[in-house]
Image (cartoon, grey):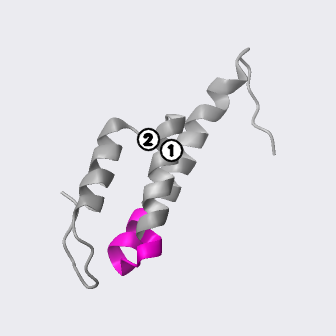
């Protein structure tokens, strides 16, 4: 399926969708990390957030929240919320 674009710039039509996909993927990684906290979930979250940041799909605020989350010690069963 191809998005229809009536302007001359195709990049404008796909950028918001890419941002939303990146947000959804990172959100799922955050939930996986918060719920289960295995080392693989941490590595996945770090990798995805670095890639999204590098591509410009992660805001500075979102990157700061993820950094704060990853700075906390990961202990299974920890029910603290991101602030």
Q: Residue furthest right?
A: 1
Density class for disc 2 (Cα within 10 Å; few <14, some 14-19, many ≥20) is many
Q: Say which residue appears at 27% left-offset and 74% top-offset.
A: 74
Range shown magenta: 28-41
Tell me, yes or no, whether the two marked residues, 2 and 1, touch with CB atoms within 8 Å. Answer: yes
| Marking on residue 52 | 1
| Marking on residue 61 | none
As displayed, is residue 80 above or below residue 30? below
Q: Is residue 33 magenta?
A: yes
Where in the figure is residue 22, as x and y percent of width and height?
53, 49
Where in the figure is residue 30, as x and y percent of width and height?
39, 64
Q: Is residue 57 visible?
A: no
Where in the figure is residue 63, as x and y percent of width and height?
34, 45
Q: Tell whether 67 sits left or right of 1.
A: left
Where is mark 2, residue-wise?
58
The numbered mark, 2 or 1, whose residue comes first in the sequence reads 1
Q: Say which residue appears at 50% left-offset and 38% top-offset.
A: 54
């Amino acid at each position: 399926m191809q998005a229809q674009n009536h302007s001359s710039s195709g990049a404008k039509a796909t950028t918001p969708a890419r941002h939303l996909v990146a947000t959804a993927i990172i959100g799922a990684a955050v939930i996986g990390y918060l719920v289960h906290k295995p080392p693989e979930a941490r590595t996945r979250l770090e990798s995805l957030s670095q890639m999204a940041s590098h591509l410009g799909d992660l805001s500075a605020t979102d990157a700061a929240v993820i950094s704060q989350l990853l700075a906390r010690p990961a202990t299974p069963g920890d029910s603290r919320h991101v602030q």
